[in-house]
Image: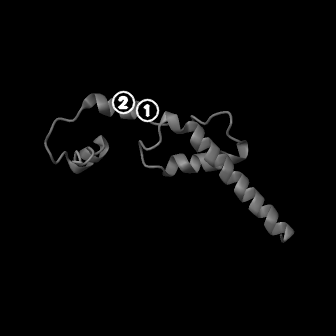
Amino acid sequence: MVTRGRKPAPIELKLLKGNPGKRAINAKAAVLQQSEALAQDAAPEMLLPEAQAYWEHAIAHAPRGLLRKLDVYLLAAWCNAAYRYEYNMRLAAKSDV
């Protein structure tokens, strides 16, 4: 089966490289990508207050445009799980289990 070739590069990457192909950049796609990006204050109610630090760290260190609105609950679940893991590891260390 024949492959179709490489996937198109993200618009941000094209702009950083100076648009090496000199082809027109789809402005609608650029606006769509920016509008779908996840804002830092978009934390859902299911996020534990103790896991807020994990949320802020993930949002601050994720590449721009990587996280979308669709990822809110998955990221919140990860933050909650990371907090619970750290909490339980501290409990286990204290009890010498």
Comparing 39 with 91, the one in front is: 91
Examine the image and state in which quarter residue 75 appears: top right
**Residue 35's quadrant in the figure?**
top left
Q: Residues within 10 Å of mark 2 (few under 14, many from 20)?
A: few
Residue located beneath label 1 in the image: 36
| Cβ atoms under marks 1 and 2 closer than 8 Å | yes
Q: Is residue 77 left or right of residue 15?
A: right
| x and y percentages locating residue 91 in the rendered image | 81, 62
The quarter of the displayed image where residue 14 is located: top left
Query: Element under label 1?
Result: helix
Q: Residue at x 23, y 50 (%)?
A: 17
Give me the residue at 49% from left, 37% from top: 38
Q: Residue at x 59, y 37 (%)?
A: 73
Residue that lies at the very extreme toward the left in this rendered image: 22
x%, y% of residue 45? 67, 33
Using the rendered image of the protein, determine whether residue 39 is visible from the camera's viewpoint.
no
Closer to the camera in the image, 36 or 2: 2
Quadrant containing the C terminus is bottom right
Q: Give x and y (percent) for residue 54.
A: 62, 50
Q: Residue at x 30, y 43 (%)?
A: 10
Q: Amino acid at mark 1?
A: Glu
- Say if residue 81 shows up in the picture: yes
Residue for badge 2: 32
Q: Position of residue 49 (x, y in %)?
A: 72, 42
- Give how far apart the Cα atoms at labels 1 and 2 are: 6 Å
Q: In this view, which residue lies farthest toward the right?
A: 95
